[in-house]
Amino acid sequence: MKIEYVARKVNLTDPVRELTERKLAKVEKYFNDIIDMRVELGQERHLYAVDIFIKGKDFDIRSTVQNKDLTTAIQEAIDKLEMQARKAKSRLKDNKRHADVIRESPDWSEDVLEPDSVAAGEPVIVTRTAIPVKPMTIDEAAMQLQGSGNDFIVFRNAGSDRVNVLYRRRDNNLGLITPEF
């Protein structure tokens, strides 16, 4: 585990490094694919500030803490980081589980209009698509849309039990269509 240290107005001693590395080993066990770990230590007036960044393949987590004692600030920052790591790990597992469910869904085909029929003023539907409508929250739908190459996802909103469409806009934000009856 390689940790990059940045110390501003703080004497970075070996015991502080050992404490940080020992505590960060707890967080490291949650992920196999950590790309970068960075610990920034600084002192402003009477407070020590500790910022810890961990960047991975599928996640970025950060923790910032200020305290009068440097070791306490490090421990609190790493505790916060560990809590975030647990949440990120469970989110990644849920996303993978949902992605597996999507892969098992039937093959999607698309409706295509032939150019000749549009030019003649009479569009004809060439193919039809059956899309499975699964119940999920808007956040789950957003995660599935981000993980797929599709521009939209049709789902049944678990909160309102209505069919919704979540789509990717040209500015890379998301739009939500909720039909009114």
Image: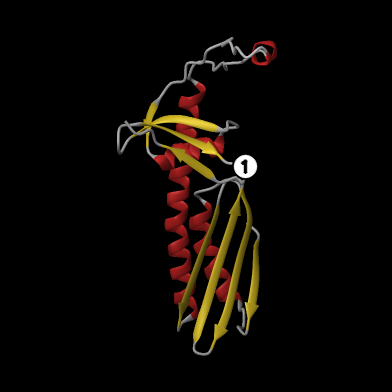
Left or right side of 70 for 6: right
In the picture as drawn, the residue positioned furthest to the front comes out as 121
- At 34% from the left edge and 34% from the top edge, which residue is drawn? 180
- At 56% from the left edge and 50% from the top edge, which residue is drawn? 59
Amino acid type at circle 1 is: Arg
Q: Choose between 50 and 108: the one closer to the eye.
A: 108
Q: Position of residue 14 (x, y in %)?
A: 60, 75
- At 60% from the left edge and 12% from the top edge, which residue is drawn? 122
Left or right side of 176 for 55: right
Left or right side of 35 for 52: left
* Color encoding of the figure: secondary structure
> Under tag 1, what secondary structure?
loop
Q: Which residue is mark 1?
A: 170
Q: Choose between 171 and 120: the one closer to the eye.
A: 120
Q: Choose between 49 and 166: the one closer to the eye.
A: 166
Q: Position of residue 126 (x, y in %)?
A: 59, 9
Q: Position of residue 75 (x, y in %)?
A: 45, 70
Q: Choose between 123 and 33: the one closer to the eye.
A: 123
